[in-house]
Image (spheres, grey):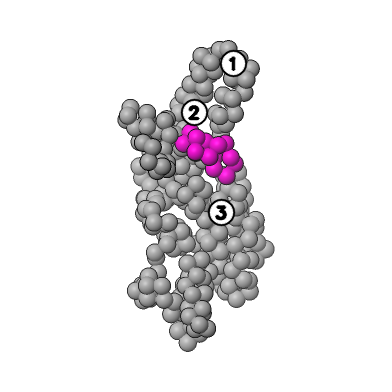
Amino acid sequence: AGNGEKVETSCSQLVAEYLGVDQRPEWQGVLAYTLQTDLHGEQANSRPDARSRLKTMVDNAYRRTPEDPGRVMLMAFDAILDWVHADREVIDAVEGDLAQAPVHEFNQGGQTRRLVVMETDNEFALEGAMASGFDAVIIQTSNGNVGIFGRKKVRLDVRGVAAVLRIEERRLHDGVELQRELKFQQLKEQGTLEESPLWHYQAAGNYILNGSLTHPEVEPTSIPLDDLVALTLIAFSDDRWPSDRAPRCSAGQCTHSRQSPCKWAWMGLQRCYLLQQAAKEQLTA
């Protein structure tokens, strides 16, 4: 409107809203891609779905036949519809699993996020859950292996989950208090730690795996599924605190000390670290 306001939308999003298809799960991937590409260009760190490089494909096609834009448009429409139909097929393939899967909401970055917990061997479980709009997914297969995945575009950080689960796994499996042996930054390292080998953390994919359908030889986790869910929600959420200290924590006051240790101090949560640093600064001010 000429008022200088920056509006985070695009023509494709407005048309989709007008047609009433913007909330259909199968259109989410395409619309997110076109919005991010329109606002930021086709950058690796802004592309929400790397399966389709529509912008590059259209640009290249137009360079080859600039005199025939109609051909380019039809080719682009075919690619878009193939993407949408593929997402619809994946969503349909996991519809039954999602219908039985519990969903948990948590606060992160001032937004309400959704975590779905699936017990299935369906090879499309993760793709279907993400295409259905979930921000985080926990999948446990029939042999007990577990994978935990976070959507990168909402900046869900799996590092905290990796540290928490590695500590809890070693405690249950061997009775070792791993946080006394390693620093929290070591517990958040990529790959598989020798000190807690049942979990593999991959930063690029934003997931942590205890085995998988392609690596069923990994020993299943000793952590019960309900506890896995609870620990994941603690690591992901911005506003979950120990019940006995919640009022002080939420007010920005860390009360952990040697004389009065907090039961969550061993987790190495980023929000706890920030509170502790703020408390130290106040003492030295």
Q: Which residues are magenta?
A: 33-47
Kindly identify which residue carries mark 3: 208
Q: Quadrant of the N terminus?
A: top left
Mark-to-mark CA distance, 3 and 2: 27 Å
Q: Position of residue 157 (x, y in %)?
A: 52, 56
**128 or 93: nearer the eye?**
128
Q: Can you see residue 217?
A: yes
Label 1 CA crowd tier, 10 Å (few <14, some 14–19, many 20+): few
- Identify the disc placed on residue 253: none
Q: Is residue 2 above or below residue 231?
A: above
Q: Are marks 2 and 1 in contact (CB under 8 Å)?
A: no
Q: Position of residue 206 (x, y in %)?
A: 55, 50
Task: Name which residue type carries label 1.
Answer: Pro
Closer to the camera: disc 2 or disc 1?
1
- Identify the disc placed on residue 66: 1
Mark positioned earlier in the residue sequence (2 or 1): 1
Kindly identify which residue carries mark 2: 83
Q: Residue at x 49, y 43 (%)?
A: 126
Mark positioned earlier in the residue sequence (3 or 1): 1
Q: Is residue 106 left or right of residue 140?
A: left
